[in-house]
Amino acid sequence: MSETQFAVLGAGAMGTIVGAHLARAGHSVVMLVRERRAQQIQSDGLRLKGLADFAVQVRTVTRPEELRSAEVLVVTTKAIGTAAALAPLKNASIGAALSIQNGVMKNELLASALPRTHILGALANFSGELQPSGEVLFTRNVNLMLGELDDTLTPRATDLAQTIDASGVRSTAVNNIRSQEWSKFTGWVGLVALSVTTRAHTWKYLVDPGAALVLVRLVKEVGTLAKACGVQLTDEAMFPVATMFAMSERAAIDVVRGLGDGYRKNSPSHKMSTLQDLEAHRPLELQETIGYAVQKAQQLNLTLPLLEATYGLVSAVAHSQTAT
């Protein structure tokens, strides 16, 4: 296969959104997908509705080892099985790679297959929902942040962010991506816990005082872990977690409920991707995300009881979906 500009690993909601926009903008895109999804794309193209409504044809590859080179690799699959998915790409010439997977373990997974100097950090504050038809409902388009892991602002990060932004997926290059990734994760853990246990649209549990309290306490525990890992939290990611970490519970609950009002007004149909997976009876990436945080806390001799209990509870809910 000849060199392509963008190789997108996975064509779920996130991969479809990124790949479709880049292809529509005229960039050379290849989607690395499973056979069933490849058949959908070959028949109907990558299809979006919601914030964007269009379809575009792209190339698909079901055998990743057939990819010889790409300027940029974008990993959008669930973290489960990432190492196995990346292994066939070890012989490919990849200029730069970034993962918009959940959690903070993702860059370590990329580094297992590619030189660390080729890896960019990234986090996605946009979302969508893959429909059974193969169409993706594009529900949120706030920002895709990316940057160098050494916290420098380089031309390659700036150029890539500008390219993605110009295609229609809002994107920004930053000089503190590790802080951004951990800050998003600090809020994400609470969102996952509440979405899986309530099975509700995001705004509904954020405005609830009891659910907001749980989220605030999880923010404070995961924030403690981030600081123990040498990471400075920021308010620039999904939630203002640095402020929430420092303020009283009561004040932080008010912040969360205010964010819930924002979701109710601007993204009333938003559901966490983890909840979408649960409802579709797909495996959840818990070990690679919340489980990774629990393991890291144990290594640092941190006592984070709510985080540990959350991991156990959410895991039990996930297991109940697959138990026979």
Image (cartoon, rainbow, N blue to C red):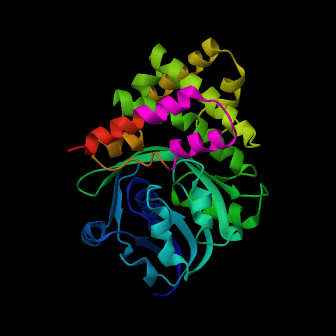
Using the rendered image of the protein, determine whether residue 294 is visible from the camera's viewpoint.
yes
Extreme residue toward the top, this view: 250
Q: Which of these two is toward me, 240 or 80?
A: 80
Q: Residue at x 70, y 49 (%)?
A: 178
| Residue in the foreground of this view, choosing between 313 and 165 | 313
Q: Is residue 48 above or below residue 271?
A: below
Is residue 27 at least partly visible in the picture?
Answer: no
Q: Is residue 309 left or right of residue 136?
A: right
Task: Please determine whether, in this image, residue 48 is positioned above or below residue 200.
Answer: below
Q: Quadrant of residue 317?
A: top left
Position of 68 relative to 243 (above/below): below
x, y (%) of residue 215?
Answer: 53, 25
* Membership of 305 in magenta stretch: yes
**Chain part drawn in magenta:** 288-313
Q: Is residue 314 left or right of residue 7?
A: left
Residue beneath the point at 70% across and 61% down: 158
Residue 222 is one of the magenta-drawn residues: no
Residue 51 picture location, percent across and down: 41, 46
**Residue 236 image point, x, y percent:** 67, 38
Q: Residue furthest bottom?
A: 2
Residue at image position (27%, 46%) is: 281
Say which quadrant the N terminus sits in.
Answer: bottom left
